[in-house]
């Protein structure tokens, strides 16, 4: 075999391997979407149908009636988490990157440690602390708890970005008589737009998809995000698969939107979050 | 009185930091300290409304050591974590290497492979529960149709299998993380190094083992460490997929701690088990600090 032929074969093998990997990656997503349109009879027939087997909107009818409130709740929590993450993280990241402060090293190290702390540890204590501070069963309580996923990450990513901004930008603003705050929010934040979007996307997804804090901090109150809504469908003995699949599709929508609209930010964010300065 | 510019900037810097410091104290420091306190308290359903309960000494820790489910949960957590990291690394690294080759479909593959990572963990658990059902599950249907199994396999309700099922689901969702990090590290390996190895007549396996792996080793270390930290925390997936069952066969530290605190209302015992988990995480902290500093220095020196 010539060298050229061999590299051509190799390339086709690579394509084949990628196709196989994508089948495994995409099949579960495909199965939920198809399942969400199947009738109860089909889902409980004891046979799995690889291709759509009749189509019905019944599951969506059930779910829209029962879950639209939950979708709204998840949206509020997701947006709230993103807003909280930006308010807390952006100024802090800026100070940690551009001001020579004595706490910088301690604070950056403790942020790294914060990322490591398991959510169940926080949830157990926060449940009682929130009882005490009247934050149980409330949006602010849940958003504060969900911020624990996003905020340390947000500060570290934004800080890495602010590092790359030349100091001259801020000096020019100061010479023009801008205050420290004006320099930050009129000059620095707009320049950091892509990093801010990355952080907001991540914070939104973490609030939207949160389960553990919703499960522990909202105990049987009116507030119920979509993940908890799905949980109630998973009975001990029988699961309403049609409704589960249809609400699962709803729960995956933001991820799908982000994949199309903000892909560049997601990939860069994932890498940035793990290599920190 | 006029403040000097330096003074003014110090004050501004501290003001910028205030919300973050307040947040860290309230949402991280307070719960961690309080968790330690709780683990020495004799909590009961009646004391939940109170901030403190009677002192219990080491009773909660003694309970954890003597409770078969707690010790099993600790063992499961180690098995689950080791298995996940192994699977995620092998598959993730293979995919990362694959994507460094130029071939049709490479860009599409690279962008779609991150999908598992975007789906809420809880939803992933639910989907796998659907796929691994005894009757009418896609996995059993495939195995029986192809002839690999004569009867449907009880993936979720067989105590000997359930942890494996959980492992498969967790590997599926964790591979993208390994792939992306290792892929970006492979991108940073200088072309000259690879060419030089090729000139010296090194085969593909030798190039990988003797040239590429040593260069990206710092990133591999950080990835493993972060993978470890993520995996010992896994909770949503387990609750959705198995709920810790059957017969506590998939009970991990996180899920059993939840059960102790929120279902049996023994917050003190839950907190003691939490501290075992916290200890595992805290052991990683200095390593992580050291490694992330190291890998940053090297990668910024190499290609960027």
Image (tube, coloured by chain):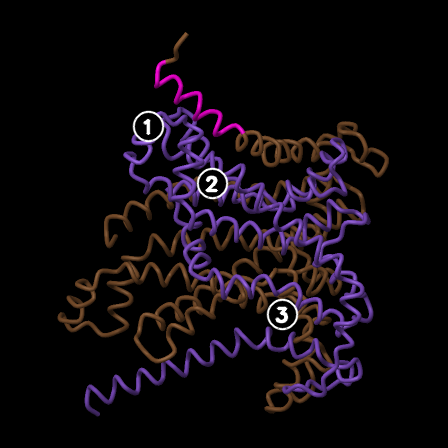
Q: Chain of mark 2?
A: A
- How far is the residue under mark 2 from the one under mark 3? 36 Å
Q: Would you say B57 lies left or right of A115 here?
A: right
Labels 1 & 3 near each other (Cβ < 8 A): no
Say whether mark 2 and mark 1 are on the same chain.
yes
- Quadrant showing the C terminus of chain A: top left
Which mark is drawn over residue A155?
2
**Residue name at image x 81 percent, y 33 percent:** B49
Residue under label 1: A176
Q: Nearer the viewer, residue A65 or B205?
A: A65
Element assignment for label 2: helix
Which mark is drawn over residue B165?
3
Q: Earlier in the sequence, mark 1 or mark 2?
A: 2
Which chain is tinted brown? B
Range of magenta residues? B4-18
Q: Nearer the viewer, residue A43 or B70?
A: A43
Which mark is drawn over residue B80?
none
Which chain is tinted purple? A
**Residue name at image x 30 percent, y 75 percent:** B102
- Quadrant showing the N terminus of chain A: bottom left
Q: Chain of mark 1?
A: A
Q: Nearer the viewer, residue B156 or A225?
A: A225
**Residue name at image x 63 percent, y 77 percent:** A31
- How far is the residue under mark 1 from the one under mark 2? 28 Å
Q: Would you say A12 lies left or right of A128 here?
A: left
């Amino acid at each position: 075999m010539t060298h050229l032929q061999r590299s051509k074969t190799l390339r086709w093998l690579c394509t084949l391997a990628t196709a196989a990997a994508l089948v495994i990656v995409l099949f579960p997503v495909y199965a939920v979407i198809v399942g969400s349109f199947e009738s109860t009879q089909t889902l409980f027939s004891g046979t799995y149908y690889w291709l759509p087997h009749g189509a019905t909107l019944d599951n969506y009818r059930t779910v829209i009636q029962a879950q639209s409130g939950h979708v709204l709740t998840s949206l509020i929590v997701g947006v709230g988490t993103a807003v909280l993450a930006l308010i807390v993280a952006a100024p802090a990241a800026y100070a940690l990157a551009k001001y020579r402060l004595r706490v910088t090293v301690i604070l950056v190290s403790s942020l790294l440690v914060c990322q490591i702390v398991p959510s169940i540890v926080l949830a157990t204590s926060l449940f009682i602390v929130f009882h005490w501070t009247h934050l149980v069963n409330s949006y602010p309580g849940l958003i504060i708890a969900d911020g624990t996923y996003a905020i340390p990450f947000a500060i570290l990513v934004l800080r890495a970005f602010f590092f790359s901004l030349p100091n001259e930008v801020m000096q020019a603003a100061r010479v023009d008589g801008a205050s420290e705050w004006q320099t930050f929010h009129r000059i620095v934040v707009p320049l950091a737009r892509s990093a801010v979007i990355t952080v907001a996307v991540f914070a939104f997804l973490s609030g939207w998809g949160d389960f553990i804090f919703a499960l522990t901090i909202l105990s049987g109150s009116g507030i119920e995000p979509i993940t908890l809504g799905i949980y109630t469908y998973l009975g001990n003995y029988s699961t309403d698969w049609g409704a589960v699949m249809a609400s699962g599709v709803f729960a995956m929508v933001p991820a799908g939107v982000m994949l199309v609209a903000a892909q560049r930010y997601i990939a860069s964010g994932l890498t940035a979050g793990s290599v920190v300065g | 009185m006029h403040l000097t510019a330096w003074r003014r900037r110090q004050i501004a810097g501290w003001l910028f930091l205030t919300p973050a410091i307040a947040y860290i104290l309230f949402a991280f420091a307070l719960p961690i300290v309080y968790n330690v306190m709780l683990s020495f308290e004799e909590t009961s359903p009646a004391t939940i409304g109170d901030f403190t309960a009677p002192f219990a000494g080491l009773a909660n820790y003694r309970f954890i050591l003597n409770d078969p489910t707690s010790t099993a949960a600790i063992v499961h957590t180690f098995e689950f974590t080791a298995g996940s990291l192994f699977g995620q690394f092998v598959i993730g690294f293979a995919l990362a290497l694959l994507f460094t080759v130029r071939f049709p479909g490479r860009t599409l593959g690279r962008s779609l492979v991150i999908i598992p990572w975007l789906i809420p963990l809880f939803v992933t658990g639910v989907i796998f529960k659907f796929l691994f059902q005894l009757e009418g599950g896609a996995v059993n249907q495939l195995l029986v149709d192809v002839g690999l199994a004569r009867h449907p396999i009880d993936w979720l309700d067989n105590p000997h299998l359930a942890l494996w099922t959980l492992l498969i689901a967790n590997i599926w969702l964790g591979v993208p993380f390994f792939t992306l990090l290792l892929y970006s590290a492979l991108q940073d390996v200088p072309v000259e190094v690879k060419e030089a190895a090729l000139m010296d007549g090194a085969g593909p396996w030798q190039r990988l083992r003797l040239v590429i792996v040593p260069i990206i080793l710092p990133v591999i270390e950080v990835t493993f460490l972060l993978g470890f930290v993520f995996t010992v925390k896994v909770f949503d997936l387990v609750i959705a997929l198995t709920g810790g069952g059957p017969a506590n066969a998939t009970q991990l530290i996180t899920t059993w701690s939840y059960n102790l605190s929120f279902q049996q209302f023994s917050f003190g015992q839950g907190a003691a088990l939490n501290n075992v988990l916290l200890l595992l995480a805290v052991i990683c902290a200095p390593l992580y600090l050291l490694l992330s500093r190291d890998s940053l220095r090297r990668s910024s020196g190499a290609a960027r």
